């Protein structure tokens, strides 16, 4: 059971925990050769798999482009290991079909999102997409040879 409140938060199930419900988003930052995905609030399995299904099948999706996934505003992740495996397989198939490789740099400072991101990293294995998980934006920025402030601006644009 989800009870929606007027302030954008909700009470989930029988608990009194309030979480923000907001859509997962993706945007292309062609000038930097990046796709930015953003998850926030309560992330559901349907939302997680749906975002990647739509992104990977989009006509403008370019295999081989790196992705930064911003999980800094995630409060709860209701995604199974099966869904992680499905998304990892979709990514691998799309990249192999184009004979491409890419990186996904996940920014997840929270303990639970960080742990789940590390699990996704393990499930992705040695496929054509390298998965790197960071607690802070600085680590992802360094991997992209960007200044943290520049990557922060890109992520802020994706939040709008």
Image: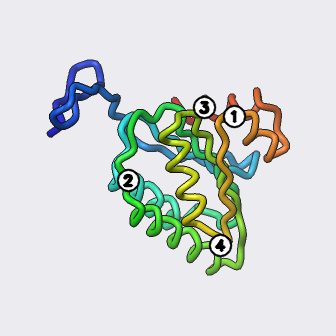
Q: Earlier in the sequence, mark 1 or mark 3?
A: 1
**Looking at the image, is mark 2 or mark 3 nearer the viewer?**
2
| Image position of 12 (left or right of 142) | left
- Determine the residue positioned at 36% across, 38% down: 42
| Image position of 152 (left or right of 17) | right
Q: Is residue 95 above or below residue 74?
A: below
Closer-to-camera residue (92/97): 92
- Determine the residue positioned at 64% across, 79% down: 96
SS class of the residue under badge 1? helix
Q: Residues within 10 Å of mark 1 (few under 14, many from 20)?
A: many
CA distance for labels 3 and 4: 30 Å
- Where residue 77 appears, x then y in whole percent? 39, 44
CA distance for labels 1 and 4: 24 Å
SS class of the residue under badge 4? loop
CA distance for labels 1 and 2: 23 Å
Query: Which residue is situated farthest in the top direction here?
Result: 7
Q: Report the disc number at residue 44.
A: none
Q: Report the disc number at residue 157.
A: 3
CA distance for labels 2 and 3: 26 Å
- Determine the residue positioned at 62% across, 34% down: 155
Q: Earlier in the sequence, mark 1 or mark 4?
A: 4
Q: Report the disc number at residue 127.
A: 4
Mark 1 highlights which residue? 137
Mark 2 highlights which residue? 79
**Looking at the image, is mark 1 or mark 3 nearer the viewer?**
1
User: Does the CB distance between marks 3 and 4 fall below 8 Å?
Assistant: no
Q: Earlier in the sequence, mark 3 or mark 4?
A: 4
């Amino acid at each position: 059971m989800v009870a929606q409140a007027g302030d954008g938060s909700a009470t989930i199930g029988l608990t009194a925990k309030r979480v923000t419900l907001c859509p997962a988003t993706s945007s292309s930052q062609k000038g930097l050769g990046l796709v930015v995905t953003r998850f926030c609030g309560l992330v559901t399995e349907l939302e997680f798999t749906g975002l990647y299904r739509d992104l990977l099948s989009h006509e403008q999706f370019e295999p081989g482009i790196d992705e930064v996934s911003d999980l800094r505003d995630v409060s709860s992740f209701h995604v199974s290991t099966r869904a992680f495996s499905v998304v990892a397989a979709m990514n691998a198939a799309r990249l192999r079909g184009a004979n491409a490789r890419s990186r996904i740099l996940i920014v997840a400072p929270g303990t639970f999102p960080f742990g789940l991101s590390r699990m996704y990293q393990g499930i992705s294995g040695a496929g054509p997409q390298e998965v790197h998980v960071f607690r802070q934006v600085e680590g992802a920025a360094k991997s992209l040879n960007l200044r943290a402030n520049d990557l922060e601006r890109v992520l802020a644009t994706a939040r709008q």
